[in-house]
Image (cartoon, rainbow, N blue to C red):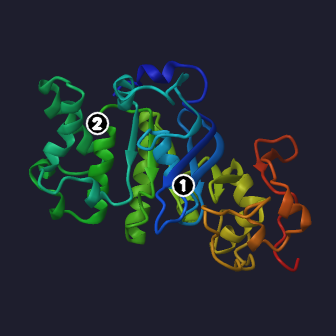
Amino acid sequence: MTPTEASTVAGPVLEVRNLTTSYPLRAQGGGRARTLTAVDDVSLRIERGETLGLVGESGCGKSSLGRTIVRLIEPSSGSIVFDGKDITRLSHRSLRPLRRQIQVVFQDPYASLNPRSTVGQILAEPFRIHRLRAAERTARITELLELVQLPADTVRRRPHEFSGGQRQRIAIARALALDPSFIVLDEPVSALDMSIQAQILNLLSDLRQRLDLAYLFIAHDLSAVGHISDRVAVMYLGKIVEIGSRDDVFGMPQHPYTNALLSAVPSHGNRDDRRRRIVLEGDLPSPLAPPSGCRFRTRCWRADERCAVEEPVLVSTGGTDHAVACHHPGVEGPGA
């Protein structure tokens, strides 16, 4: 396959600026209507051929951010610039040609694959939707199966005949059908056994190199993120609280939330395996009523009066691309 025309454009493949996604909630029992802000003023970029890992607890807004970026959810404000073009307010008709360049792989491959269709029909669907020539489909489908390391006779079978890992390979093949340059991978290995996870991660890394792809890799498993990502963004209650290269974020985490997440993982490259486990107090607050000031302060051992009244902004550490939103950044855990 040849590189797409989009890959010749200078600048990042994706740039998100001050993106916010809110959901109005209906009033119940005579109460007042409320608004849930799942993504709150997020800015980030992804370079061509790069993988940005996005991590955080369940409910922190990771999937909402990914789905907003590909316009499966409409943003409330901010902008999404893909390949130098602002796609935030494009109509669905105007956005349709760009859909070929932006694809998604979801967590549950069985739910995202039509159980009544054969694999051949599933892989042919993108060509039909985008009205591409039928004569090219057979050869392309064979090529796609080779890319994801599945046999050619896979086309005659249906999703229920495959294992979870094989179904995810089929979902990846479908995402690759139209030669995209950017793919959102929304928890693509979390439903798989550990041994299968490693196989899928290696496949995704290989495909990125071969096809010059860029990924937004969404996960709660930091081991998987460390395996595949070039840079890492940490999300908490709709906000990016730390972002930087994988080595910087994993090796010198500055936000206490990042420290807590990493402390639960046994090994991070050349980090000391004996990192003391940090157990966070309390549950993740409701995004309907986030804490004032720093949103993490209700679970943070460094919090003081300033944290309760002043929201920290994301600023670089020492003039690098490693940035943190914390009034008291550092690598120390509680009691240090």
Residue 78 is situated, as x and y percent measured from the top left of the image, at 61, 35
Q: Residues within 10 Å of mark 2 (few under 14, many from 20)?
A: many
Q: Which residue is mark 2?
A: 177
Residue 335 is situated, as x and y percent measured from the top left of the image, at 87, 80
Which label is found at residue 247? none
Specify the quadrant of the image occupied by residue 20. Answer: top right
**Residue kind at label 2, given as amino acid type:** Ala
| Image height of 59 relative to 69, above or below | below
Determine the residue positioned at 58% across, 66% down: 57
Which quarter of the image is occupied by the C terminus?
Answer: bottom right
Q: Nearer the viewer, residue 208 or 14?
A: 14
Estimate the spatial distance between the alpha carbons at disc 2 and disc 1, rounded to whole Å: 25 Å
Considering only order in the chain, which callout, 1 or 2, is on the residue closer to the N terminus?
1
Furthest-right residue in this view: 305
Q: Which residue is mark 1?
A: 62
**Residue kind at label 1, given as amino acid type:** Lys
Under circle 2, the secondary element is loop
Under circle 1, the secondary element is helix
Determine the residue positioned at 70% across, 77% down: 280
Horizontal relation, residue 320 to residue 66: left or right: right
